[in-house]
Amino acid sequence: MRKMRVVMILALFLAAAPSLYCEGFQYESRGKRDPFVPLVGGSRPTVTKLEDITSVGDIKVEGIVVGAQGNRMAILNGDVFKEGDKAGEVEIKKIESISVVIMIGGKSYELYLPGEEGGKKGEK
């Protein structure tokens, strides 16, 4: 009889467990440390959010995504942007297959994916 109670209680707990842990959970990465950047040595980015960017040197193109209809989005400093988006002083003008054209302070720059075109950041 005791084993039956334990099994019933365990079954009730297991049935309710997913809703206890998952309901309403949303992970927010903004403001947290990048787990892929070493704690010791190596260079760490000092500016992460595009809203805080004042120099093209602070922007890192991490990826370019192309949708089924050809829509392109760029991952810059961990955030996803489409053409025409603005964040602080930065405006995304054009997204190509290996580069992103941005405008900062009235100047246009073309930023390449790492390993493409030497990863150059050049004024356009």
Image: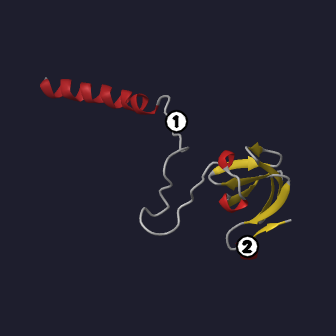
Q: Nearer the viewer, residue 27 or 104?
A: 104
- The quarter in which the C terminus is drawn is bottom right
Residue under pointer 1: 26
Q: Quadrant of residue 101?
A: bottom right
Residue displayed at 68% across by 54% down:
75
Question: Are circles 2 and 1 on residues that touch, CB within 8 Å?
Answer: no
In the drawing, does residue 20 fall left or right of residue 76? Answer: left
Residue displayed at 82% across by 49% down:
83
Horizontal and vertical percent for residue 23? 47, 29
Secondary structure beneath disc 2?
loop
Q: Nearer the viewer, residue 103 or 80?
A: 103
- The colour mode here is secondary structure
- The quarter in which the N terminus is drawn is top left
**Could you say which disc has been placed on residue 16 in the image?**
none
Vertical order, 120 against 17 (above or below): below
Residue type, numbered disc 1:
Gln
Task: State whether residue 96 appears in this view.
Answer: no
Residue displayed at 68% across by 60% down:
63
Vertical order, 44 against 79 (above or below): below
Give the farthest residue toward the bottom.
Answer: 118
Q: Nearer the viewer, residue 20 or 109?
A: 109
Q: Quadrant of residue 113?
A: bottom right
**Could you say which disc has been placed on residue 116 in the image?**
2
Which circle's residue, 2 or 1, is located before the other in the chain? 1
Horizontal and vertical percent for residue 22? 45, 33
Task: State whether residue 75 appears in this view.
Answer: yes
Residue displayed at 80% across by 51% down:
92
In the drawing, does residue 90 fall left or right of residue 79? Answer: right
